[in-house]
Amino acid sequence: MKAGVIGTSYGKVHIIGLQAAGVEVVALCQRDQETGRGIAKQYGVPQVFSDWEALVAASELDLVTIAVPPHLHLPIAKRALALGKHVICEKPLARTLEEARLMGRLAQRAGTRAMTGFNWRFTAGMQKMKTLVNAGFLGRLLHATGTWYGTRYADASASLGWRNERELAGLGALGDIGVHVIDLLRWLGGEFRRVSALTGIAHPDRELAPGKRVDTDDYCEFLGVFESGAHATVTLSRVARGTTFHRLQLFGTEGALSYEFQRDEPGWATGQLLSAHGGSRWERVPLSPPSSDPAPSDFSERTGRATFAPLVRILLDGVEHGRDVSPSFFDGLRAQAVTETVLQSADEQAWLPVPP
């Protein structure tokens, strides 16, 4: 299979993950041609485009991956799907639920494989957590917590960009990190029925341009109720000084599971998983680290090989055997439904149902 990658910031993770999964990356798209040529040389990619439409139209491509700001996700995916390409699109799938629904319909009509970049399903600890949940370790889920802290905009002098502008990003912390937590909780506990939320902007007086202030959320807390009746508590922040980690905990009638991932520590691609069953105390669950564990200092290498490559392998398997794939555009759509309801709930200060 031959692929083209649009975007070369987080797109480097895509290139590395695709190559690690055995996909031939033959093209990339970067407006700054000098930057694009440098990255292409680094990873052995033969073609560099400055225009995404030209890349998507390249006849030799079987797969297009999208690693650009969310306002471009819909037009790129629409064109790629219309040309019969498979697509992997970064999260959040779109800026709005309406856009995400359209992308879902387009993918369904195209009949190709369309995936959302929920790569944090694929650490060893999270994969083991899913296996235990599916085996009934928890019994009936009662309540869950999801926490993700990052430091990107903690400092008032941090550089601003598209992530701080709703017109381009659609979402702030909810799009950067919240959709991952929502996806993981959906994957483990089922669909959300309703939510009640608070959101905040750390430095609301900062301006993207004269007269144009930042307008995306930097931190968020919300309560949720699953379709099963189980409860969820979610805390998100991209302005949490001193830490970059996420944690999910699930408590059921028979057992409990606690997963934690520290971004900048050795063994980061494995994570840590604890379990408790019956009357036992927390015990560490043995985990098998990935076969390739790059140095923690190389974010793109470690993330691409350990978390993006497994996602690509699911797409390859789906194409070869005609199977459905997950995380799909449908998973991206369902996460989008929750994030949009969270924003609306915070604005209205009310419990609101998550739309179907």
Image: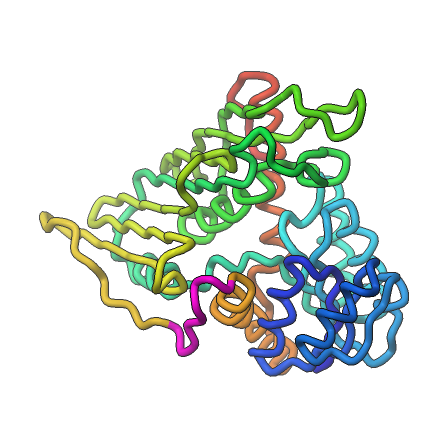
Q: Picture coordinates of residue 210 (x, y %)?
A: 80, 23
Is 7 displayed left or right of 221 in the figure? right
Q: Residue at x 51, y 23 (%)?
A: 198
Q: Picture coordinates of residue 174 (x, y %)?
A: 57, 38
In the image, farthest residue toward the left: 279
Q: Residue at x 46, y 59 (%)?
A: 121
In this rendering, does residue 14 appear at all? Answer: yes
Q: Is residue 293 magenta?
A: yes
> What secondary structure is the magenta-colored segment mainly?
loop
Is 111 displayed left or right of 232 in the figure? right
Up-down: is 33 above or below 225?
below
Residue segment shown in magenta:
290-298
Q: Picture coordinates of residue 227 (x, y %)?
A: 45, 39
Q: Residue at x 62, y 57 (%)?
A: 116
Up-down: is 160 above or below 112?
above
Q: Is residue 255 magenta?
A: no
